[in-house]
Each structure stands twice: as structure tokens, then as C-alpha cells.
Image (cartoon, rainbow, N blue to C red):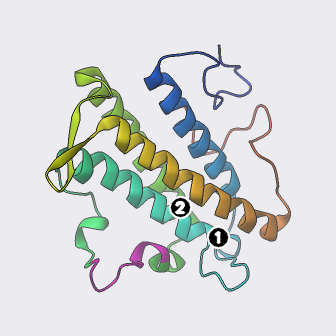
Amino acid sequence: MTSSATPWEPPLAGTEAEQLIGALERLRTTFRWKADDLDSAGLAVRIGASALTLGGLLKHLARAEDEMFTAKLSGAPVSPPWDTVDWKTAPDWDFESAAADTPEQLYALWDRTIERSRATLAATLAAGGLDQSVHLNWDGDHLSLRRLLCDLIEEYGRHTGHADLIREAVDGRVGEDPPPGWRSAEYQRP
């Protein structure tokens, strides 16, 4: 049973799908908490020699979610703005272009993408479970939906760690998880 004060916690016991989705949701929520409620200056903070910013990470993870649950899952085209970018000449466009976006645009892009991803994942699981093959393949071998979820969990794990360090540099916010009862004004986990 999940606490209403900490709905991002994965189930203590559950099916494999529930555990994987729970791990993903916890990372999504922790990432959003690390990036939450900042102005343009806060979203543009960099630490050390790194070019990473929380704004860039918001946009990059929105791209990762969209690619995962469109092109990689089914072969469907990615959504705007990703469909207009020449990724060969601008491979870091998502990170770099975030500097020109307002906080409202960045938060809305990530929030909308997460809602779309959740709906697509739920429908896909209902249609065939974790073992079903997805569009993405390596050398002719199609990945399973399970592998796609694990890849997205890995992506969030890496970037939530980055966000943790950057947010501490912005205003000292630290912690493994949001405090009990935390809710973003925009982002709501179901």
C-alpha cells in the first residue's frame, strides 16, 4: 500500500510491472522535485565545468520520454518540437535550446510529455505485457517493453543524480525524495 503522503514510493510488494513503473514514477517525481519551482536563473545554473542545467535536463528528459514511447515503442513519429530538429547537426539541441525557453514552457513540456507517456505505457501494457516486442531493434533483435522501461529508469537515474547536485548549488535543496506531502503546482502523479 502506498501512503497518500508519499505516493511516489513503489509498492512494497507487487508485480514486476508494478515494481518497474513504481521505480520510474519515483525517479520522475524526485527529478521533478529537484527541478521544481525555479525561475529562469535557477533553471540556468551550472556547476563546475559541466554545461548541464536543470532547464536542459527538463527538456532532455521530455525528449527521452517522447522518443521512448513513440519511435522506440511503436515506430510512430516523435512529437513537436523534436520532429523539426536535425539531430545530426545539433545533437545537444534539447540541452542547449532550453536556455531560450521560459520556466513555464519547460515545466509544461515535461509535464505534458509525462502524461502522454503514462497513457501510452498503460495502454501498451494492457495490450501485451512486459514481454512484448517493441519497434526498436538491434541487429534485427527487437527489444522488449521491459527493456525499454529499464532503459528509461537508467536515464532518469543518471539525470536525477545530476539534478540533485545542481539543485543543491541553486538553493541548498537536498534529499533523496520529496518531503511527505510534497506536490508541485503543475505536476501531479496519479
Q: Earlier in the sequence, mark 1 or mark 2?
A: 1
Tell me where the magenta segment starts and ends, as one range.
87-95
**Residue 183 image offset from top left, x and y in percent:** 68, 38
Of 87 and 185, the residue lying toward us: 87
Q: Residue at x 44, y 57 (%)?
A: 62
Q: Residue at x 35, y 44 (%)?
A: 148
Residue 45 visible in the shown view: yes
Mark 1, secondary structure of its residue = helix
The residue singled out by tag 1 in the image is 43
- Rate crowding at label 1 as few (under 14), some (14 to 19) or many (20 or more) other CA atoms within 10 Å: many
Asked if disc 1 and disc 2 are in contact, CB closer than 8 Å, the reply is yes
Inspect the image, locate mark 2, and give the three-letter code of the amino acid beneath it: Leu
Q: Is residue 146 left or right of residue 171?
A: left
Between the residue at mark 1 and the residue at mark 2, the CA separation in whole angstroms equals: 9 Å
Inspect the image, locate mark 1, and give the three-letter code of the amino acid beneath it: Leu
Residue 84: image quadrant is: bottom left
Residue 102: image quadrant is: bottom right
**Residue 180 image offset from top left, x and y in percent:** 79, 32
Q: Residue at x 31, y 55 (%)?
A: 67
Q: Residue furthest left?
A: 140
Mark 2, secondary structure of its residue = helix
**Residue 122 image offset from top left, x and y in percent:** 35, 28
Q: Is residue 115 left or right of residue 4?
A: left
- Rate crowding at label 2 as few (under 14), some (14 to 19) or many (20 or more) other CA atoms within 10 Å: many
- Please tell me whether the stretch drawn in magenta is mainly helix, strand or loop: loop
Residue 116 visible in the shown view: no
The residue singled out by tag 2 in the image is 58
Of 6 and 151, the residue lying toward us: 151
